[in-house]
Amino acid sequence: MLVAAAIFTLVSAAIHFYFFGLESLRWTVPETMGVYGITAPQDADTTQPLAYILGFYNLFLGVGAVLGVLLLGLGNPVAGLTLISFSTACMVLAAVALLASRWPMARIAMIRGIPALLALVLTLMGS
């Protein structure tokens, strides 16, 4: 059970690293603007500072998740499972908040939230 939890945790981390890249590094690129439904370059320029910070939140959540898996694998289950649980719970709650605030972002919320939810459930069941 914990092996599956670790795999879903790493998938969730990779997804959050990807969104870090979109939000913090590529926000004004037309393909990224399309992902977020931004049509006017001025809107991307205006929202870039917020997206930049949001991307770093995603990066930090991903790093926490990876550190949890590493600690679990290195024989520190208490710290590892705590970090995995906290990181994936934050990912799930962020996906719920995104879904609640912007229904057109449902696809992105599901991409971010479902693997994290699976990781969280498997972690709690396996610990």
Image (cartoon, rainbow, N blue to C red):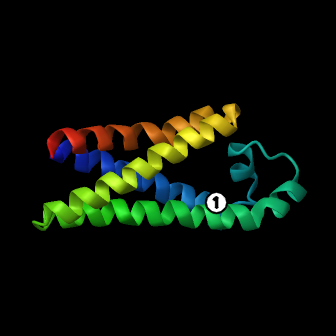
* Total marks in image: 1
Residue at x 17%, y 61% (from the top left corner): 78
User: What amino acid is at disc 1?
Assistant: Glu
Query: Along the line of sight, which residue is nearer the eye, 51 or 96?
Result: 96
- Mark 1 element type: helix
- Dot 1 alpha-carbon crowd within 10 angstroms: few under 14, some 14 to 19, many 20 or more: many
- Left of 72 or right of it: where is 39? right
Q: Name the quadrant of the N terminus.
A: top left
- Left of 50 or right of it: where is 42? right
Query: Along the line of sight, which residue is nearer the eye, 46 or 96?
Result: 96
Q: Position of residue 15 (x, y in %)?
A: 46, 51
- Left of 58 or right of it: where is 69? left
| Furthest residue in direction left, as rendered | 75
Q: Position of residue 62 (x, y in %)?
A: 42, 60
Query: Along the line of sight, which residue is nearer the eye, 20 or 34?
Result: 20
Q: Position of residue 11 (x, y in %)?
A: 36, 49
In terms of image quadrants, where is residue 108? top right
Residue at x 44%, y 60% (from the top left corner): 61
Q: Position of residue 21 (x, y in %)?
A: 57, 62
Residue at x 70%, y 37% (from the top left corner): 102
- Left of 23 or right of it: where is 114? left
Query: Along the line of sight, which residue is nearer the eye, 65 or 11?
Result: 65
Which residue is denoted by mark 1 in the rendering? Answer: 23
